[in-house]
Image (cartoon, rainbow, N blue to C red):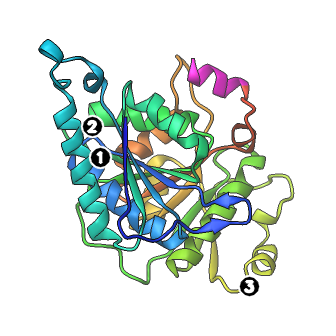
């Protein structure tokens, strides 16, 4: 079941190969999810992309008594209508659609990622009551998505001022994982008209343009980039060096033991970071190939 409604009667921007892929945002009606909808709508506007609002509701498919409408259908419509209204206020020029699907939210969002360019989720942080529900969803989606996933926390502070940079953290995962993180962070800083701070968490890695400031300058001559070392990159050190920021960009990691979708550092950051955080998947997951760690994480 889906409902598509344009925020204004204009066609979605098209690329050379067809319609522009949408930005997908998950919503469950919570304030955390609505904060993610606001962020996703603004990001869709920056990218010239449509917005696809997805709500997973397992009860929406259950039949009512004597042919009545499913008991969960009314609530599902209310959730998507509220998200649509929030998106319209955040970005009036964006074309948006709302879709209610049956099943668990992780599976629904991963299916939606199949034809999207970005997935956006809301999450509670720092011990909020709904964290036990929302945090595992974010962990499982970011641990398995072939697309970058931006996790937007509940807004607790004023918007980050224009002088604060986008921050990329390199060196947390395998060397080959750094390039997609660097490319995503550079594009985000350009879209947001912000400088970029690159934190290098490990030295002595194989040669790559991501470790060379001159290569950065050659690839992104119009972007102001600052490089700083980050010794012993615990979660607390990462946040102390990076936040507040309009966007913290890092690799999505490779899972952990006991079928966990995220390792301990990424789980900690998801639970405590109060700035929007983009987790960029490794190249093999983006190309449809799973590493042994990814296979373990996804069960």
Q: Secondary structure at mark 2?
A: helix
Q: Look at the picture and state if 233 lies above or below 218.
A: above
Range of magenta residues: 292-299
Q: Using residue 201 as the reference point, say whether residue 3 is left or right of it.
A: left
User: x and y percent of residue 185 in the render?
Assistant: 60, 65
Q: How many numbered circles does the render carry?
A: 3
Identify residue for label 1: 125
Q: Using residue 236 as the reference point, say whether residue 92 is left or right of it.
A: left
Q: Secondary structure at mark 3?
A: loop
Give the camera-side residue of 156 and 90. 90
Q: Look at the picture and state if 185 lies above or below 138.
A: below
User: x and y percent of residue 298 in the render?
Assistant: 57, 23
The part of the image, by quadrant, that contains residue 198 is: bottom right
Q: Secondary structure at mark 1?
A: loop
Q: Look at the picture and state if 169 lies above or below 64.
A: below
As drawn, which residue projects farthest toward the front? Answer: 67
User: x and y percent of residue 274 in the render?
Assistant: 34, 56
The part of the image, by quadrant, that contains residue 294 is: top right
Q: Main secondary structure of the magenta part?
A: helix
């Amino acid at each position: 079941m889906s409902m598509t409604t344009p925020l204004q009667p204009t066609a979605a921007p098209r690329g050379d190969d067809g319609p522009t892929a949408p930005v997908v945002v998950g919503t469950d009606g919570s304030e955390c999810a609505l904060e993610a909808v606001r962020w996703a709508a603004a990001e869709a506007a920056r990218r010239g992309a449509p917005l696809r609002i997805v709500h997973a509701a397992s009860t929406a498919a259950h039949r009512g008594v004597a042919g009545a409408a499913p008991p969960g259908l009314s609530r599902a419509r209310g959730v998507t209508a509220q998200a649509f209204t929030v998106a319209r206020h955040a970005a009036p020029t964006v074309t948006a659609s709302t879709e209610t699907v049956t099943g668990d939210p992780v599976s629904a969002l991963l299916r939606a990622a199949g034809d999207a360019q970005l997935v956006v989720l809301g999450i509670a942080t720092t011990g909020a009551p709904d964290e036990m529900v929302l945090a595992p969803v974010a962990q499982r989606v970011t641990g398995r998505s072939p697309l970058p996933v931006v996790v937007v926390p509940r807004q607790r502070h004023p918007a980050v001022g224009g002088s604060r940079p986008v921050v990329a953290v390199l060196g947390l995962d395998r060397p080959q994982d750094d390039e997609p993180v660097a490319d995503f962070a550079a594009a985000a800083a350009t879209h947001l008209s912000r400088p970029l701070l690159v934190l290098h968490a490990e030295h002595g890695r194989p040669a790559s343009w991501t470790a060379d400031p001159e290569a950065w300058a050659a690839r992104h001559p119009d972007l102001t980039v600052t490089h700083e070392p980050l010794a012993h990159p615990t979660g607390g050190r990462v946040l102390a060096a990076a936040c507040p920021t309009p966007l913290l960009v890092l690799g999505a990691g490779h899972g952990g033991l006991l079928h966990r979708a995220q390792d301990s550092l990424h789980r900690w950051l998801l639970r405590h970071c109060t700035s929007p955080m983009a987790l960029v998947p490794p190249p093999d997951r983006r190309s449809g190939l799973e590493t042994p760690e990814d296979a373990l994480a996804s069960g």
